[in-house]
Structures are given as structure tokens and as C-alpha cells.
Image (cartoon, rainbow, N blue to C red):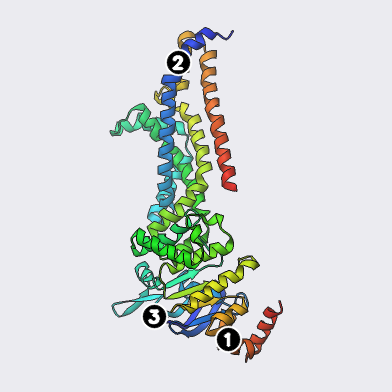
Amino acid sequence: MIQFDKVVKRFGDVTVLRELDFHVKPAERVTLIGPSGSGKTTILRLLMTLERVTSGTIEVDGQCLSHMKRGDRMVPADEKHLRQVRKKIGMVFQQFNLFPNMNVLRNITEAPVRALGVPREQAEEKARDLLEMVELSDKALAHPSQLSGGQQQRVAIARALAMEPEVLLLDEVTSALDPELVSGVQSLLRDIARSSNLTLLCVTHEMNFARDISHRVLMFDQGQIVEDGPPEQIFNEPEQQRTRDFLQAVLNA
Amino acid sequence: MIWDWNWTLEILPQLLTQGLLVTVQATLGGAVLAFVLGLFVALLRRSRRAYISRPVGAIMEFIRSTPLLVQLFVLYYVLPDFGFKMTALTTGIIGLGVHYAAYTSEVYRAGIDGVPKGQWEAAIALNMPRPYTWISIVLPQAVRRALPALGNYVVAIFKESPQLSVITVVDVVGLARGVGSESFRYLEPMTIAGLFFLLIAIPASMLVRRMERRLDT
């Protein structure tokens, strides 16, 4: 489903990703862990086309993200190509990024209506189903500013799902929440993950959540994968010293 | 010189009907034009195509760096030589509107820059087409941020509108001067004209300040 091939990403003089290779299968749930600045979030941002690769290629569902074919040459992707590949990908952000000028229902329906051309009534029906799933049916007409952080993040999850993505990217989605709201959002995501065929790529500092939700965990350090394995291996018997150090630091925090 | 109440009551209706009407027309016309034009200018200046953004920026810089008075003279007395002829009031509204568009465009620019990056990123993540990102997400937030400053410019346009008298637009002040020169008494008509500006500008400024406070919270 997702294929990274020798991906390099530099910001000025700083190299964030160094010739990164990895592969994610359809419906696989992968969690990226590692210290801050190790390039985890950059991977999600590259997939969402919020950043461009410096070199290397990223494929999603067999389609190249950064380049497209013109004749028999590969040229940098234009807006039309990007819109095509983006259809398959959705993202939930650390800071929610709900649109403050719209009520909850409009937040969820705006993109299906504007980007996919779904009729508004149909989009609203779907939005109400999604709101029921995230247990916010009574907040359809509320504005984001009237909601708690946890409620806002659940709306953001519904908003991403309304576009029916095949790949969902979760970027530290509980990091900005008050501690007592974290578990509600996590159990919602767990239910969504288990009841769907979504391919999930998740950056988190919550190790229990990582263990719970993922088929596979990738340990990152300095722009490279240090260790790659099922959560049981990574959390119970990590092979690499770097992974052991990191987990010890995080779990004893 | 003693204040003459009888005469005051005699000239008051004329000042408040004829004069007021012209002042209000000039202010509202100028403000609406400045708001609409300013928004387009702000968008053009953000264009990635340098052959659009540069000239627009230069023209606005030119407008901001020359007096409104000179611009009004050029519009009213020079342009007709090239075949553009408009009534004095229309010319005045265009003059005020274009002049203040140079300022409101900066207000919009600040408003647009103030929209958090996360809003743009969410729009991309949702695959929103670019025009709708502007229309339904960025501009509503930017304009909301810009409202108090725009309100201040309405007050400014209102207070500058007597300048239109140089191109023969007769507003409250122009009328007061006319009445004064006929009777050699300026005390009453000019006081009325001044009070009239005061009575409108103060509540308007208070309204703008209230808007600012509400947006802060």
C-alpha cells in the first residue's frame, strides 16, 4: 500500500530522513516511535503531500506521490496529480485544525461536498452517522470553540473519515489533550481500526496505545529505522540497544 | 460675536439634509469600494506570478505615498482631458475608494497571514480545491480578523470626505462654508459641521473598539 524507496528529506542543512526504505501492506497498522526530531512526523507529512521529498520516491497504492509520467519521463507532480493520489489518504493532526468559522456538521461535510462533489444532503446524512460513531450527535450544530479538546479531536477524526480514505495518518493525535481525555480518543481509534480495513500509520508517544493498536512497530532514530517488528518483540524483547534505551526513558518518565 | 440660536435653527435643516446626504454617500461609497478593491489587491499581491504581484504592489505604494488631494485633482481635472468624465461625487467616491484600498489591502494581508498554517494543512489533507480553501476557510477567518481595522478606516474615510470639496462636491463642510461666506458668519455653520462629525465619529470608534475586544476573547 505504501512504499518508501531511498527517501531523503532535508530542511536546509538538516537531514531529517536518510535514504529511508519501508513498506506497509494494505490494512496493516504501523506505529512509528522514537525520539523527537527522528523524522516520524516528517514521514506522515510527506505522505500527505504537505512536504516534498528531497530525493527518492514514495508510492501509495502503486501510484507515485512526488512524480508523474509525462511521455516516458518522470516529472514533478502537478496539482491535478496530487489531488488524485491524496484522495486515498486522510490525516488527523495533533492540534485538530478544525475550521473555527464552521459548525461541527459543516466541518465534516465541507470537503466531501467541495472536493468529491457529494450532494449536501447525502454528505450530512453520512456526517450524522459519523458523529454518532464518535458519540457527538448532540454537537452537530456546535462550533469548535465550544468543544473540549477531546471532542474536537473526535470531530477531526470524523472529518477525516468522511472522505473515505484508504490510508489514515495519525500525527500524535492525543499529545495536545488533557490527560483525562486521552483514553476516550484512544479507545475510539482502537474501535475504528479493528472494525475497518484502514491502513493506519500512527506517530505516538503513548506506548500502550502503540502496543494495542498496531501490527507492527518501527523504531526511528536520526532519520532511519533502527528496529522493525511486531509490538510484542519491540516492547518485550527489543534487539537493539537504542530501542531499549528509548523505551526505558519513555516508560520511566 | 454671540451665538445666534434663531439663525442656527434656520440653517440647520439645510446642513443636515443636503450636506449630510452627500457626506454619507461619499463615505459609504468610498468605504465599500475600498473594502472590495482592497481585498482584490491583497489577493493579487499574493500571486505567485511576479508580473502580477509586483506592478500591483508598486501602484499601491505610489497611491499611499501621494496625497489624496493630488489624486482627487488628477481624477477630476486631468482625466477628462483623456476622455474620462464623471460627476464630481462619483469621482470623489472613486478617489476615496482607491486611496483607501491601498490601506485596506494591507489590513487584509495581515488578516490572511494571521490564519494559522494548520488551517491550510487541514484543507490540503481534505483535498479541498484551492478556490474553496480561500472562499470557505481562509477568507472568512481573515476578514473576521480584519474587521476592527476596516472599521477604523470607515471612520477615517468619513473624516477625510470634506476634502472632496476641492473637486466641487458640496458636503456638510462645503455647505457650511457656503452659508458662512454668504452671511459672513462662520461660527454657527462650522460648529454644526464639526459637531456633526464628532457625534458620528465617536460612537463609531467606540463600536470598533468593542468589536476589537470581542475578537480578542
Residue bearing the label numbered 3? A61
Residue A101, visible in the rendered structure: yes
Chain letter of the residue beneath label 3 in the structure image: A
Where does label 2 land, which residue?
B13
Marks 2 and 1: CB-CB under 8 Å?
no
Residue A175 image point, x, y percent: 61, 69
What's the residue type where badge 3 is placed? Asp
The residue carrying mark 1 is A231
Image quadrant in which the C terminus of chain A is located: bottom right
Quadrant of the rendered image containing residue B60: top left
Residue A247: x percent and y percent? 66, 83
Identity of the residue drawn at 45% across and 10% down: B182
Q: Secondary structure at mark 2?
A: helix
Question: Total marks drawn?
Answer: 3
Q: Label 1 near label 3: C-beta < 8 Å? A: no
Is there one chain holding both mark 2 and mark 1?
no
Are dots 2 and 3 on a single chain?
Answer: no
Looking at the picture, how far across and down is residue A105, in whole percent?
A: 45, 58
Which image quadrant for residue A111? bottom left
Q: Is residue A73 left or right of residue B105?
A: left
Foreground pick, A251 / A64: A251
Work out which quarter of the rendered image holds the N terminus of chain A and state it. bottom left
Q: Which mark is residue A31?
A: none
Q: Secondary structure at mark 3?
A: loop
Residue B48 in view here: no
> Does B17 sit left or right of A96 as displayed?
left
Picture residue at 40% right of the left edge, 47% below the top: B40
Residue depicted at x 53% and y 42%:
B148
Instruction: Indicate whether B60 appears above or below A11.
Output: above
Report the Cα–Cα distance between label 3 and label 1.
Answer: 25 Å
Q: Position of residue B113 (x, y in %)?
A: 51, 54
Q: Identify which amino acid the numbered label 1 is placed on.
A: Pro
